[in-house]
Amino acid sequence: MKNIVILISGRGSNMEAIVHACAQRQWPARIAAVISNKADASGLQFAQARDIATAVVSHKNYASREGFDAALAAQIDSYQPDLVVLAGFMRVLTDAFVAHYDGRLLNIHPSLLPSFPGLHTHERALEAGVKVHGATVHFVTSTLDHGPVVMQAAVPVLSSDTPDTLAARVLQQEHVIYPQAVQWFVSGQLQLAESCVKAPGSQLLMLRGIE
Ligand code: GRF
């Protein structure tokens, strides 16, 4: 049985999708804890209602990134994680933190990396006029929004899109690819060789649409 620790900062809809998939698909894993850097992250209530352990490590209580990351890692490690899942966790992590979880730290980013790392990805995709956008699950490395790609979901960008409609289309697919990627990890089916990930199934989900 693998232990999964999920880190959130907000509503936690990706966390919810992973919790549901873990239960419904009977993964050889348990959600050991959901941890947030924000006490008011609404996703914490979802976890508590399902008797999942929760904890808050507020970045505001630490003078440095190093201090916060060390406290966060101590909290995470108390649950003996095999996998740490960043699900809308809005903090930049130190190299030491990333190295500590090397090969067992996943993130989801709302763009088709390497396009649009960082914030406001949907606005930037619309500004750039791209016709395909999406989301990426990747192993975390010390470069922000970088690292070996586990799975991507591609969605069409429509001329009628606003950042909100595009975000909603992408988020729906995030809820498909993140549980899939975590499932592959906990069942030991992901192989990482020279920064390339091999998975037992298709690593690309395409939502087709023609205007
Ligand atoms: C998602 O779009 C995710 O890709 C990004 O932050 C958002 C988090 O949403 N990293 P939620 O908290 O999982 O609902």
Image (cartoon, rainbow, N blue to C red):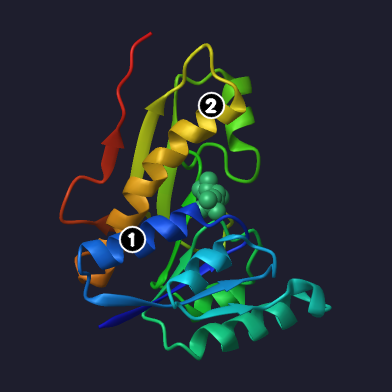
Pointer 2 residue Cβ closer than 8 Å to ligand 1? no
Q: Is residue 82 left or right of residue 127?
A: left
Q: Amino acid at mark 1?
A: His
Q: Is residue 50 left or right of residue 58?
A: left
Disc number placed over residue 20 in the picture, else none: 1
Q: Residue at x 53, y 57 (%)?
A: 12
Rendering quarter of residue 27: bottom left
Residue ranking furthest to the right? 63
Category of crowding for the residue at label 2, using alpha-carbon neighbours closer than 10 angstroms: few (below 14), some (14–19), many (at least 20)? some
Q: Quadrant of the N terminus?
A: bottom left
Q: Position of residue 135 (x, y in %)?
A: 44, 41
Q: Residue 138: name its quadrant.
A: bottom left
What residue sits 44% from the left and 31% below the top?
169
* Local secondary structure at mark 1: helix
Residue 162 x, y percent position in the rendering:
59, 22
Residue at 34% across / 12% down in the picture? 210
Estimate the x, y position of residue 92 in percent, counting from the top left: 66, 62
Which residue is pictured at 63% across the width and 21% down the height?
A: 127
